[in-house]
Amino acid sequence: MPELPDLQVFSRNLTNALKGKKIDKIVCHSKKLNVPVKDLQHTLEGAGLARVERAGKELHFIFDNKHVLALHLMLHGQLKLAKEEETKNLVVALKFHDGQILSLTDFQAAATPTLDPKENNTPDALDVTADYLREKLGKTKTPVKTILMDQKVVRGIGNAYADEILWDARLSPFSASNKIPAEKVKQLTESIKKVLDDAEKQLLKDHPDIITGEYRDFMEVHNAHKKKTSTGADILQKPIAARKTYYTKEQEEY
């Protein structure tokens, strides 16, 4: 599933490619759409795209008529910008006046379009503060990795980047959240911003034009092809709530 750094890059590239273009037609086969398809078409056909923004793990297509189309790619959603509409596993296609078509496909049909999503007040991972995180962690014994991935606590972090953040903070993913000392929570908060910002820069360097997919080659610990980190530590793997978790003995458990 694409996470915050991926979606940051996708949104930038989609804005550059589609800003100002008007939608001629929308095709939608999703059963998860929150309104009738005809309402989606009536609302957005003829509207111009102002920009694409990331909101948590969603892409928000913001139009000049003030309406928003949110796309959640889920695990296997794929975006493609071309002159031809994708027909196999199509979720939704935006056909622009210049002939370009942005298609979202998903063989599991789980990717979700939403017209005018409700406002979400959960803080974004790039905006989270140490005080907020300390308050949330202090309320539960749940492993800290699980809390970092909870989109009702912090938006934007998934399985892969949770591992990277926790390794950077030298904090064990198995730590009981309410046992983590305040100084370590502060370090964790700093690692969240550092790891996510650095990953976005790396993606822009290595894959500057991407609008879909997951690129994980540069990751320190969440990498099935690596045996050791750059610090020489052995990379270990153990599940948390059925999710593969990569970590090292460098990370302190509380």
Image (cartoon, helix red, strand yellow):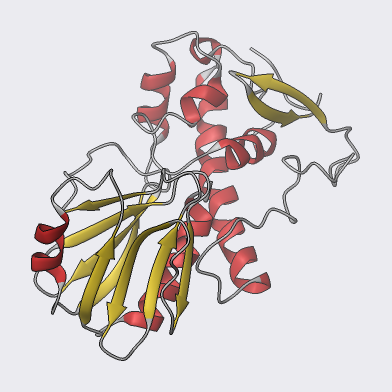
In the image, 51 versus 38, the foreground residue is 38
Does 232 sit above or below residue 176? below
45 with respect to 7 (left or right): left
The picture places residue 206, in percent across and down from the top left corner, at: 68, 71
Q: Which quadrant is home to the C terminus? A: top right
The picture places residue 142, in percent across and down from the top left corner, at: 50, 12
75 with respect to 29 (left or right): right
In the image, 223 versus 232, the foreground residue is 223
The picture places residue 143, in percent across and down from the top left corner, at: 56, 16
Q: Residue at x 51, y 32 (%)?
A: 186
The picture places residue 56, in percent across and down from the top left corner, at: 37, 47
214 with respect to 74 (left or right): right
In the image, 69 versus 97, the foreground residue is 97
Q: Residue at x 45, y 61 (%)?
A: 8
Q: Residue at x 55, y 71 (%)?
A: 210
Q: Look at the image and tell me whether residue 28 can be seen.
A: yes
